[in-house]
Structures are given as structure tokens and as C-alpha cells.
Image (tube, rainbow, N blue to C red):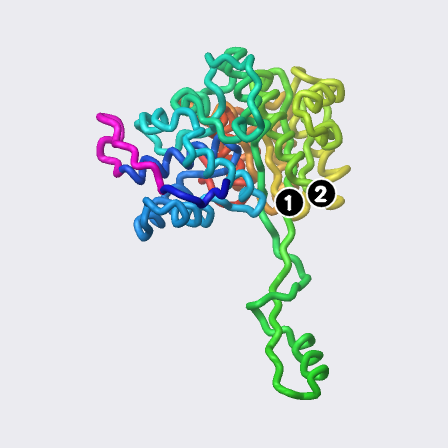
Amino acid sequence: MDATSNGGLPRHEPASPNGADAPAPVVGAVALAAALRGAGLPVGPDRVQRFIAALDHLDARDRTEVYWAGRATLCSHSEHIGRYDTVFAAFFDGRVADMRQAQQVPARPVAGYALPSITEDRSEPEDDEDQTALVANASSVEVLRRRDVASLDDDERRQLQRLLARFALPGAQRRTRRWQPDRVGAIDRSRTVRALLRSGGEVAQLRHRSARHRPRRVVLLVDVSGSMTPYADALLRFAHAAARARHRTEVFSVGTRLTRLTRELSHRDADTAMAAVAAAIPDWSGGTRLGAQLKAFLDRWGQRGMARGAVVVVMSDGWERDDPALLGEQMARLHRLAHRVVWANPRRARPGFEPLVGGLVAALPYVDDFVDGHSLESYEHLADVVAGREVTIRA
């Protein structure tokens, strides 16, 4: 069925007392955004706000107008359009299960990822379209998004793993020295002159050109030492989603040794990739020698070009066994090479946290963004930081 045919945005009644002041189109827009997030689209609060603002100027009862408003504001990449069409059609055809539950989320309008609830029976298979569009228990998913990964039980961990399998790390773009033909932009004198010569000197249309862009390389350094054991699996699955979606992503594990994991994480299936990673890492749950391993990375790969102009993400709690001065020295080297240095710390969100451990004290002066790394919500934020959509002030 055409995603734009028939109907308009559902006229949900405002829930009371939760969201009692929210107009009905706003509630429907939030529920649609939640369904899209469940399908893996990176629909953040800023895009939802733009969608709602666009609806203020349109007829929210007209399905076609709502479709194009959502497509223009909620999709950030052409690859998202197919999933958007599927979810949009399922949403307006009533095949999305619990839209009304999304209205009951009191604190944040975006309900988060949509997957079957923890208690739902998953024994019956579902077709691909329904799996893509399914929104089951928005409240439980929203809670899961904010839970510390270290505190999850086995069922919640399996649900988190499915969410991370759908994760996307779009990354930032960088301008190259090459140009490409365009309808607007600077005048392309060479093409314009050639067009004049072909027309025999007659007046011809001006040709334009614009700069060509390419994805900026992303390097992930994942701490797999003993203190990071509760978070290592989730962080490596995050790295798997990033490496699978972007060919310019490199992944290393750091502990007492440096291990390149890019090839192991290239497998499409997350569980197979994790098995390959477990076999490749010799120092899982061992000690931490961040300074020595960062020096090994810079000497062998970073100085040769892997870190040059890249966004480098260090995922670690900063507990360093060696002299922190060596870590500070290597972080200074890394900062001179990289476009940005991001540090994701799973312990940063804990009450009373202060970056007092020696490794963090030595490293933070050379970190551009210091972010959380303990929950699914923090990984979404980290993806935005890597893509250059958000900048975090260092603690």
C-alpha cells in the first residue's frame, strides 16, 4: 500500500494526567517518532520538534502532508526512506501495537527503540515488515534505554543486544579537495568554456560545481580490562554496529595488549562477530596499560595515517596501571593527529563521580568531548557526538 494514501495523523486523545496538556497531533507525532526509533532510525528530540513545528503549518488530518513533513524532518539519510515508508504505513494502518502506551511516557516525548517487551512471548515468528514496525512496550524500552548496562539481567541484556544490532553510527563528513558538478555553487569555468565552444560561442548556461565530501574515519579503542568487564560486551556490540555500517571504521581493544578487531567485527551477524572477537582478544578482563597500548597504536597505525584527521573514541574508565604521565604524553600525540578525541566513560554518570583517577587526570586535557558510556541512551548520544551533531563540554 502507498504510504501516503488515505487518512491523517491519528487524533489521539490526550492522556490524563500524563501529557494532559499535549495537543492530539503532538501525541501522534511522538508515537510515530517512537515507532521509527524502534525500526532503528536515529530520530532524536530535535527532529521530533522539527516534525511538530512542520505540522503546525500543515493539515495534520491529511496523510500525504504528514508523510512528506515526516520524511523531510525525521529522515537524515536516503537509506532511511525505505524503513520510514514501512513504519509510516504500518503506523497509519493500525499495525503498530501499542501506540497508546507511548502517550503515557511522562518525562520525554520520544519513547525510544521499539522491540517486544521483556515479558512478551517470542515463540511465534513474525514477518519482516511487522518486525521492522513493531512497537510493543514503549515505557519498558524507555526505562531500558536509561538503565546502566552493568545492572541488566539476562533478558534485558538480550533485548539490549537486539537494539544494538540495529544501531547506526553515521559519522561525520569531511570536505575533500576534489570538486563535483552541481546545480548551484561556484561557477565551473572549465565546463562553462567547453559548453561555449560546443555551442559555437553562443550564450550557454553557466555550469556550477561544489566540493566533494567523504566520510571521516572513526577509530574506536575499547578497554576490555577487568574493571570494564560489565560494559565490554555492550561496547563491542556498539563497535560492531559501527564497523558494519561504515567501511571507514577501525576498532581496537586495549588492555595489557593492543588487538585490532576490524576484521573480526566485519561479520554481519553480531553473535558470530562477538565469538570471533572473544577468540582474538588474549587479554580479556586483564589489567590496564592504556598509555603503553595507545603508544603502540600511534607507532604502528596512528602515525601512518589511521588517526590523522579521524574521530578517535576511547571507551574506558581511565583506570591506568602504569605511570599516568605516559598516557598523558600519548594523548597529546593523539590530539595533534586526530580531528577530534572523544572519551566515553561508563562511570561518569554515577552520582558523585569526579575524574580523579590518574589516567583520566592525565588524559582529559587532550579530550575534546567527555561523555557517558553506561547505557543505550548514552551510546545514542555518543553517536551524535561522533557525527558532529552534538558537542559535550568536558567535566
Q: Please tell me which residue is depicted at 29% across the width and 33% down the height of the picture.
A: 12
Question: Residue at 53% of width from left, 41% of height from top?
Answer: 368
- Kindly identify which residue carries mark 2: 306
Indicate whether 182 appears above or below 82: below
Q: Which residues are magenta?
A: 8-23
Nearer the observer, 74 or 171 = 74
Residue 351 relative to residue 234: left or right: left
Position in image of residue 127 (x %, y %): 57, 25
> Mark 1 and mark 2 in contact (Cβ < 8 Å)?
yes
- SS for tag 2? helix
Figure quadrant of residue 244 = top right
Q: Which amino acid type is marked by label 2?
A: Met
Please say if 18 is above or below 208.
above
Residue 296: horizontal and vertical position, in percent?
74, 33
Report the residue that reaches farthest toward the bottom: 201
Which sits in the foreground, 306 or 214?
214
Q: Amino acid at mark 1?
A: Ala
Q: For mark 1, give the secondary structure.
A: loop
Residue at x-position 55% and y-position 41%: 82
Q: Position of residue 20 (x, y in %)?
A: 22, 31
Q: Is residue 390 visible?
A: no
* Above/below status of 255 relative to 123: below
Which residue occupies 32% across, 35% down? Answer: 27
- Determine whether, in the image, residue 307 is placed left or right of residue 55: right
Q: Residues within 10 Å of mark 1 (few under 14, many from 20)?
A: many
Quadrant showing the C terminus: top left
Q: Is residue 13 magenta?
A: yes
Residue that mark 1 sits on: 310
Q: What's the magenta bit mostly, secondary-structure-wise? A: loop
